[in-house]
Amino acid sequence: MDHDSLARRHAALREAARAGLVGPDAPVAGFVDVTGVREAARELRAAFAGPAPVLHTFAVKAASLVPVLELLNEEGVGCEVASPGELELARAAGVPASRIVLDSPAKTVAELRDALAHGIAVNADNPQELARVDALLAEGPTDSPLGVRVNPQVGTGSIGAMSTATATSKFGVALRDPGAEDWLVRQYVERPWLTRLHTHTGSQGVALELMAESVRIVYGLAERINREVGGQQVDTIDIGGGLPVNFEGEEITPRFAAYAKLLRETVPGLFDGRYTIVTEFGRSLLAKQGFVAALVEYTKTSGGRRIAVTHAGAQVATRTVFVPDSWPLRVAAFAPDGTLKESPDLVQDVAGPCCFAGDLVARARTLPELSPGDLIALWDTGAYYFSTHFAYNSLPRPAVHGFWTDDEGRTRFATIRRGQSLAELLAESGAAESGALKGAGEPPLVRR
Ligand SMILES: *Cc1c(COP(=O)(O)O)cnc(C)c1O
């Protein structure tokens, strides 16, 4: 299956080059393997199937593209949203409120009111947010399932910025702080409408055992609350996302099945049917189903180092460029016609188009010798890359295309997002406000 994925991507790159979806007229583009997305969603559903009811949601921030959300919705995966924009994307994709979860550390009153009016599940992040929910419920009833996000403070993974369950994390109610657990249990006892508990111990770089330990702690908290209220008040446990992705090779590891198995062993009670499980995977569903392709514009030598200047840099590979050691990417080299390059290897830097020195997607990488007109692919970039554009240098958001193979074995494409036009770029850069500062704040004339 992993091998099929590589073959599909090679075929897509060849066809994309032939069709001009990437090349001199489209120097950078994103691609999504539709078959791969469907397979990943099915694998996820199979891994968690029964006996407990499960609601799978996709963390929209990982691939904020409406057609991708529609595709996942078709495969039975709803949306986890964390901003009004992400909520609007989920709605535009036709995802029903019953399959949307709103988590965000900074929900405004207006956002909370909107969610409660539409029956969207909300996980409160902190005591102040819980007080806001109290006030909104005093205005009128809601169909929204409501819960609290808990930070079990289990510790850190290998990437600090990605570890959400550290002792001092900004997310959720810190369960191990003095008095916190008793306080939280009291909040549930006083509010029969608090029926969910949420935790997300992610993301990339966090060990599966640590994630499972978080879920075990939250499950134990649910059991305690239900004991104290004398019934099944907490009926849903949201285990978040955070499954890491193998950026080093083709192999999909860990698999959803491995994580589900570990959870079934660590927290058997979670699966016995008394609780509904909610999941919020992002990267693990999409990363390996997408890639960035870009044109090599120039090659040069600097201080003895060969450099390929391409059109894929910080604007589409932001984390890789700014934190290269934590987010290395595999780079593949192709001829202008999209065929894999077999030329001898050469140590090269692969640079992007942005005007700062660190704009490199790979440093001192051994690759077939790149020449102007060649193409590169950045594998495993289906999540948090082309969909999470960084508007440096007023570079436009690139087009994103979905691909699949038709009955005759031909690669087909559909545009998921058009490339941003210069007119659109101007519009989001204040062009309509042109003249707004003319004469404003001029130095006052010296008074005589
Ligand atoms: C980002 C996020 C996710 C998804 O994380 P991945 O590492 O992409 O799986 C899920 N839940 C919440 C609350 C998040 O913030």
Image: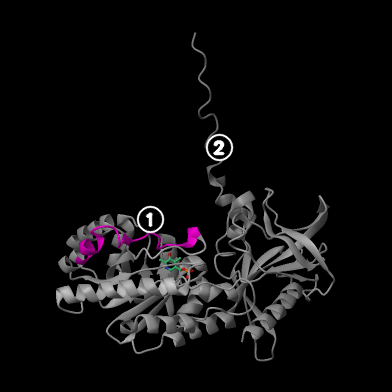
**Sooner in the amino-acid sequence: mark 1 or mark 2:** 1
What label sits on residue 448 in the rendered view? none
Residue at 70% over, 70% down? 21
Q: Which residues are magenta?
A: 160-185
Of the four image quadrants, the one with ligand 1 is: bottom left
Q: What type is the residue that disc 2 sits on?
A: Gly
Could you tell me residue 143's position as x and y percent? Answer: 25, 72
Instruction: Report whether 23 appears left or right of 324.
Output: right
Quadrant in which residue 148 is drawn: bottom left
Residue at 32% over, 65% down? 150
Instruction: Report whether 232 appears left or right of 215.
Output: left
Residue at 14% over, 77% down? 230
Nearest to the eye among marks 1 and 2: give it.
Answer: 1
Disc 1 is placed on an element classified as loop
Residue at the extreme right: 344
Q: Is residue 162 magenta?
A: yes
Q: What type is the residue that disc 1 sits on?
A: Thr
Could you tell me residue 201's position as x and y percent? Answer: 41, 67
Q: Nearer the viewer, residue 271 or 62?
A: 271
In the picture, the quarter occupied by the N terminus is: bottom right
Could you tell me residue 443's position as x and y percent? Answer: 53, 22
Distance from disc 1 to disc 2, alpha carbons, whole Å, reads: 46 Å
Could you tell me residue 325's position as x and y percent? Answer: 61, 60
Quadrant in which residue 221 is drawn: bottom left
Is 20 drawn above or below residue 75 in the view shown? above
Instruction: Report whether 354 appears left or right of 133.
Output: right
How busy is the neighbourhood of tag 2: few (under 14 within 10 Å), some, or many (20 plus)? few
Q: Is residue 448 magenta?
A: no
Residue at 45% over, 69% down? 59
Which residue has dot 1 on it?
168
Which residue has dot 2 on it?
435
